[in-house]
Image (spheres, rainbow, N blue to C red):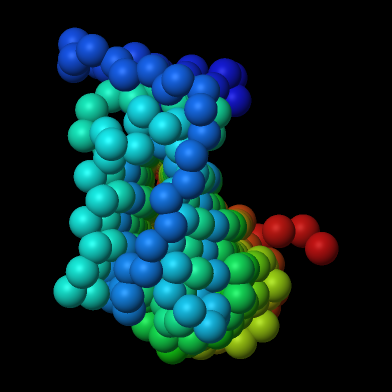
Amino acid sequence: MKKQLFALALVTAAGCFLAGCNGIAVITGNGIITEKTFDPGDISRLTTAGYWKITLDPNADRNQCTIVIDENLLEELAIKSGSGRLQVTPLHNLRPSREPQLRLQLKQMPEKLNFSGISNLEVTGKITRETEWSFSGSTTASIPGFAAPEIQLQASGISRLTLGGNVEKATVSTSGSTKFTFNGNIGELHLEQSGCSSATIRDCETARKMTVHSSGSSNFTFSGNLQELFMEQSGCSNAAVRSCESAEIQLSGSCTAKLDAARQLTVRAGGASQLLYSGSPELQVHTSGSAKIKKQKQ
């Protein structure tokens, strides 16, 4: 059912962009593919909108931007470059004959990046500086090369984001049906979830502290070694954490959580919430309503 809803949402989003939900006429590509290449200079802020396949190399030996699109659609783009900014957005509703491409070779990674519309993003190479990311619409992104002190990320719509590497501090906000995955190490995470979004942290061996706020029907999954966890859940959200040293959990509504805690576990649960825990932590529990706290059988 979820896959069907996702497919329907994707088709609807594509239809709105390509067919013109606002009633404005659609400009169709003529099938003659052309390229426009230029030097955008050093970029600190990147903004794109519309339908794109984007490749970004932040470790190149030059600054170069190449746009590949139907010849008659090139003039329908607003391309603004200069003063540390690059913006590529459509002026009208466009229907390309094939997937347009935006290829970026940059000497350094932009600090702020904003992607909206229907984008397919691939970032190659290492990202070593602090960055801020914003995704909306139905962006699909692969960004495996983080080696950075800090990232900030905000995502909405039906984005599918796969990140990896090593980050000292991450601040992440997801909503809608966004799916966020990080493969690797995050030292400190602050996560805000809503809607039916999901966040998965895998193979995280050096996590010091994580703060998670989940609402709606969101889902949070962590696997690795975590020292300290604060988690607040509401609605019908779900969480599974394996494993942590100490945790403070607040549950309400009909949410559920599974947790492996080694040293200390403090729980405040209300409504029809449920917690299933394992390990032998020092336990402090306060429940109300029909909330249930159970230890998993070995």
Q: Position of residue 144 (x, y in %)?
A: 62, 68
Q: Position of residue 235 (x, y in %)?
A: 36, 41
Residue 15 shows in this picture: yes
The image quadrant that residue 286 belongs to is bottom left
**Residue 175 sits above or below residue 56 on the image:** above
Is 110 left or right of 92, judged from the image as shown? right
Residue in the image at 23% along x and 45% along y = 78
Q: Going by the picture, which residue comes out furthest to the right? A: 298
Q: Residue at x 61, y 87 (%)?
A: 206
Foreground of the two, 298 or 150: 150
| Closer to us: 36 or 123 | 36
Mark yes or no: residue 188 visible: no
Q: Residue at x 42, y 22 (%)?
A: 29
Q: Position of residue 200 (x, y in %)?
A: 58, 58
Query: Which of the two residues, 4 or 81, is positioned nearer the viewer here?
Result: 81
Q: Which residue occupies 19% across, 11% down?
A: 23
Above/below status of 71 relative to 78: above
- Please tell me how many numbered marks the rendered image carries: 0
Q: Quadrant of the N terminus?
A: top right
Q: Camera-side residue: 186 or 101?
A: 101
Percent of width and height locating residue 109 = 42, 77
Q: Quadrant of the C terminus?
A: bottom right
Q: In which quadrant of the rendered view does residue 122 lie?
A: bottom right
Q: Quadrant of residue 145?
A: bottom right
